[in-house]
Amino acid sequence: MVKVTEITASSILVPQRAGSLSGAYDYSINPYAGCAFSCSYCYVPKFPNGNHHFSEWGQWVQVKTNAPELIRKERARVFGSRIFFSSATDPYQYLELKYRLSRRCLEELLLYKPHKLTLHTRSHLMLQDLDLIKSFGSAVQVGVSFTTDDEAVSRQFEPSAPSLSRRLELIRGLHKAGVKVYVSIAPLLPCNPKRLIELIKPYVKKVWVGQMSYPEINNKPELLKEYANFFEPNNYRNVVQQIASSFNSSFMGEPRPVTKKELAVLSSYKEQPLRVSESNLVQPAQAQLKLSL
Ligand code: SF4
């Protein structure tokens, strides 16, 4: 059961001065806080939100009902900017059927002409806004998360997210409509890499292949054990490289546990003590950048 709360947000354009989006994007927009897709590996809960403990990730969503109005209010910042939509939620989770919040945000953004807009989702519901998305022309690109070729594995790690066949339907639909689309294979889950490549290669030229990170906040650690052979570092890295090298351009992210700085943030959760050992703490590994999104 997901607890849904309607809230009035104080701002909607989040400046990207640090982190993985900085440099490529000026702002991110998250019409919802929390995410009912509840992926077990999600990195978002390492950033506290209110009193929610990271183990409750997927059980609550806040609906920023005034998000479109905030975009209108902040329109001067939208013009000519580079926006990532969304970095900390899925803008097309099923609540979108009720609230149409992402659609209304996109309608506002279209009026104020961002220079670059990247939409990111795991959800075929985006197809209902295809005409609107096409209206952004060359300014828009869509990233679709497609993490394995195996539906059963996806159900284990991403139990509430749309099926892989639905995501493939989205990738195909975007490709057919002439919308720039790339696939985010992040984190790569246990798969048959040859089949995974064959499934998506007809539709995309670019992929982002990321490895499993943040084991400390993975809410299904038993799966990491069940698939220990696949996640064995040498094997995992080889599969990631095999996939990345099969595409014209790719970004390969390195896995990493939480850093000391992030640990300090995580420790601010009050409900449960964190069990993270100092020996697990490392600085973010260098990523090999081959693609600039
Ligand atoms: S869809 Fe994205 S934001 Fe939502 S739980 Fe999965 S990884 Fe996290």
Image (cartoon, rainbow, N blue to C red):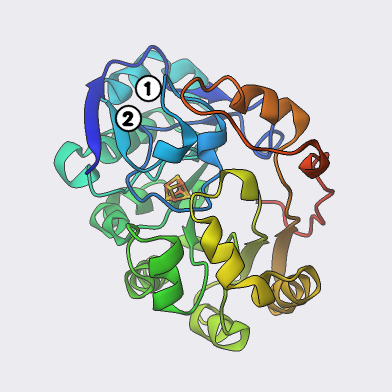
What number of labels is visible? 2
* Nearest the eye: 16 or 231: 231
Residue behind mark 2: 108
Looking at marks 1 and 2 on the same chain, the residue that comes earlier in the sequence is marked by 1
Q: What residue sits 27% from the left and 56% below the top? A: 125
- Pointer 2 local density, CA inside 10 Å: few below 14, some 14–19, many at least 20: some
Q: Which amino acid, by three-letter code, is at mark 2?
A: Glu
* Nearest the eye: 78 or 44: 44
Q: What residue sits 41% from the left and 46% below the top? A: 136
Check the image and report above or below for 65 versus 148: above
Using the rendered view, name the quadrant where residue 261 is placed: top right
Q: What residue sits 49% from the left and 55% below the top? A: 220
Question: Which secondary structure lies at badge 2?
Answer: helix
- Pointer 1 local density, CA inside 10 Å: few below 14, some 14–19, many at least 20: many
Which corner quadrant holds the N terminus? Answer: top left
Q: What separation in Å lies between label 1 and label 2 (alpha carbons)?
A: 7 Å
Q: Which amino acid, by three-letter code, is at mark 1?
A: Ile
Instruction: Please indicate whether residue 172 sits to the left or right of residue 195 in the image.
Output: left
Could you tell me residue 152's position as x and y percent? 40, 76
* Nearest the eye: 234 or 109: 234
Q: Is residue 178 visible?
A: no
Q: Are marks 1 and 2 in contact (CB under 8 Å)?
A: yes
Q: Can residue 41 be seen in this view?
A: yes
Could you tell me residue 37's position as x and y percent? 35, 51
Check the image and report above or below for 52 versus 168: above
Residue behind mark 1: 71
Could you tell me residue 264's position as x and y percent? 68, 23
Instruction: Please indicate whether residue 259 sits to the left or right of residue 61 in the image.
Output: right
